[in-house]
Amino acid sequence: MNTQIAEYARECAEKGMRGDYSACQADYTVLQDYASYTPQEQAVWQQLAERQMILAGRFAHSAYLDGLSAIRIGSKIPDFEHVNHELAKLTGWRIVPVPGLIPAKPFFEHLAARRFPVTNWLRTAEEIDYIVEPDMFHDFFGHVPILSQPKFADFMQMYGERALDAIDLGGDEMITRLYWYTAEYGLIREAGQPLKAFGAGLMSSGGELPFAMSKDARTSPMDIETILRTGYEIDKFQRVYFVMPSFDALLSAFETIDLAELIARYKNDAPLDPATV
């Protein structure tokens, strides 16, 4: 384990975060070690998957549902290599196992290369309803199905590329907000269609997905500049959800926006209160 990874592992341990970083490669990847999963962990996956499949059928966008079918998520913990065989044929993406959260730069480098980092451990039975840090279920069930869909797959690769530029410009927090409000908590309402969800934080949550689709949730039309400026909280339901008109519109808006100019203008400003957007 190199010095940089060792320091990151120490920081994670001090925060009480899980994950064995001792076996990390230089890009923070590890082995999935499928044979190590216990019957209890398989039971937790099954319980989570069955619950979220029902909710997805009610609230998920058709692209997410198509992804669920395409990569054949079932009642057993997925074998990443088997999934990669299918995912690569669909969009050229693959998933790489990691021990937990990894630093922003290697995370974005993976996205830019069409690799999605997925945590290799699963929450406990006591954490079925809520977990503080992302685990395998959040990363896989939440993010991977939509990566099988070409337009969103292209957006995520572009996001990785432009996020690396944003870091160099001092826009770390701003570019992270875009990921939060799209890949994690994005909603979509296409012309003539009902509101649907696709963000991973919603698709993997038994509580927040129904809330985000209820009349109690506040929504706002997609505007990349506003999203880049809007703060968020990780330990409670979102106080605003941004609604995309289509994945084409999201890709086009991010592709054409002057990211450097926006970062220069707003990077030193306090974030907007999501309750006022």
Image: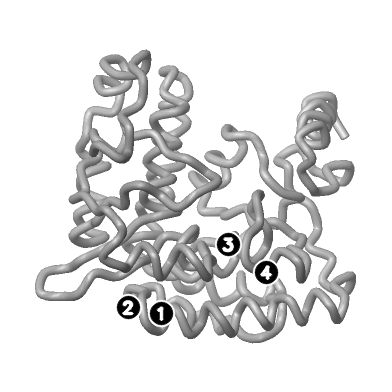
Is 84 or 8 nearer to us in this picture?
Answer: 8
Label 2 or label 4, whichever lies nearer to me, is 4
Position of 63 with respect to 82 (left or right) is: left
Q: Which residue lies furthest to the front in this view?
A: 216
- Residue 45 falls in image quadrant: bottom right
Q: Find out whether the residues at labels 2 and 1 contact each other: C-beta distance under 8 Å.
A: yes
Q: In which quarter of the image is the N terminus?
A: top right
Question: Helix or strand or loop: what does disc 3 sit on?
Answer: strand
- Residue 84 falls in image quadrant: bottom right
Point out the tag, 2 or 4, that comes first from the N-terminus: 2
Position of 48 with respect to 67 (left or right) is: right
Q: Name the residue under label 2.
A: 62
Q: Name the residue under label 4.
A: 128
Q: Mark 1 points at which residue?
A: 65
Report, in whole angstroms, how far the alpha carbon at label 2 lies from the one at label 4.
Answer: 26 Å
Q: Residue at x 10, y 74 (%)?
A: 192
Image vertical order of residue 115 relative to residue 179, above or below: below
What amino acid does circle 4 point to?
A: Ile
Q: Which mark is residue 94?
A: 3
